[in-house]
Image: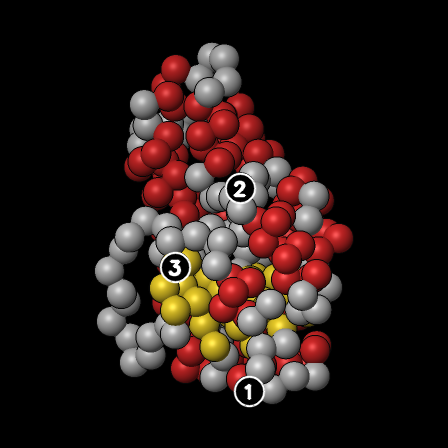
Amino acid sequence: MAITTCVFDAYGTLFDVAAAARQAAAEPDQDALRDKWPELANHWRLKQLQYTWLRAVADAHADFWDVTQDGLDWALEATGLQGDPALRQRLLDLYWELQAYPEVPAMLKALKDGGMQTAILSNGSPPMLEGAVRSAGIGGVLDDILSVESVGVFKPHARVYDLVCDRFGCERSNVLFVSSNGWDAAGASGYGFVTAWVNRAGEPMDRLPWTPAHVLSDLTLIPELAGV
């Protein structure tokens, strides 16, 4: 069936999750962070994801902002930077203003010009996602922002993916789902979406029962995959 709806994960897919640490490290008086920001960013993202999985299987859901702060606290301690409350607050503030990847605005515009329905489907809470979309200036090329908060469980639970067809009235096979997380793309494949894994880092394929239909290095070819 033809693709009618393109849905994107947010963090790491449309928005650069390393941008907060990278930007903070470039600011004055951040000597301690300057050499450690890549390590900090990697720890922060990994713990953020791990905590969503653990909370999902333990039926202990929390707002993604709480999970994001918990992940940062672990990362700060792991890198020896936990003694600077001002740095912690600056990193959290910057997370609300994450930069979009360079190809994102033109890619989304091409989808909308081609008649596609477009949306975000994210673990992020609505205020976090609205802040990122506003900061990136892409609200005009998105039809909706869907958050797991409406179902109370994190991805890759099927109830999260249900939100897409419930919102757009489409079949699963009409959806192109795009994520930078291999496990997310795999889970969406098992659910029945057509999927694209944006593998910017050149990582190995996750060993899961399902695999993405497409593997890309960035988002440039998404309009072509969608058929516009």
Indicate the secondary structure of the residue bearing disc 2.
loop
* Residue 126 position by quadrant: bottom right
The answer to whether residue 214 is visible is yes
| The C terminus, quarter of image | bottom right
Q: Residue at x 53, y 46 (%)?
A: 103
Which residue type does callout 1 highlight? Met
Earlier residue among tags 1 and 2: 1
| The N terminus, quarter of image | bottom right
Q: Residue at x 70, y 69 (%)?
A: 115
Label 2 crowding class (10 Å Cα cut-off): few <14, some 14-19, many 20+? some
Residue 136 point in image, percent of width and height: 65, 42
Q: Is 213 on the left-hand or right-hand side of 99?
A: left
Query: Disc 1 versus disc 2: distance between alpha carbons?
Result: 30 Å
Query: Disc 3 versus disc 2: distance between alpha carbons?
Result: 15 Å
Q: Nearer the viewer, residue 14 or 23?
A: 14
Query: Disc 3 versus disc 1: distance between alpha carbons?
Result: 22 Å
Label 3 crowding class (10 Å Cα cut-off): few <14, some 14-19, many 20+? some
Where 91 falls versus 42 (above or below)?
Answer: above
- Residue named by callout 3: 216
* Residue 110 position by quadrant: bottom right
- Residue named by callout 1: 1
Q: Nearer the viewer, residue 161 or 169?
A: 169
Residue 30 point in image, percent of width and height: 44, 17
Which residue type does callout 2 highlight? Pro
Which residue type does callout 3 highlight? Leu
Where 170 falls versus 35 (above or below)?
Answer: below
Indicate the secondary structure of the residue bearing disc 3.
strand
Where 92 falls versus 86 (above or below)?
Answer: below
Indicate the secondary structure of the residue bearing disc 1.
loop
- Residue named by callout 2: 102
Earlier residue among tags 3 and 2: 2
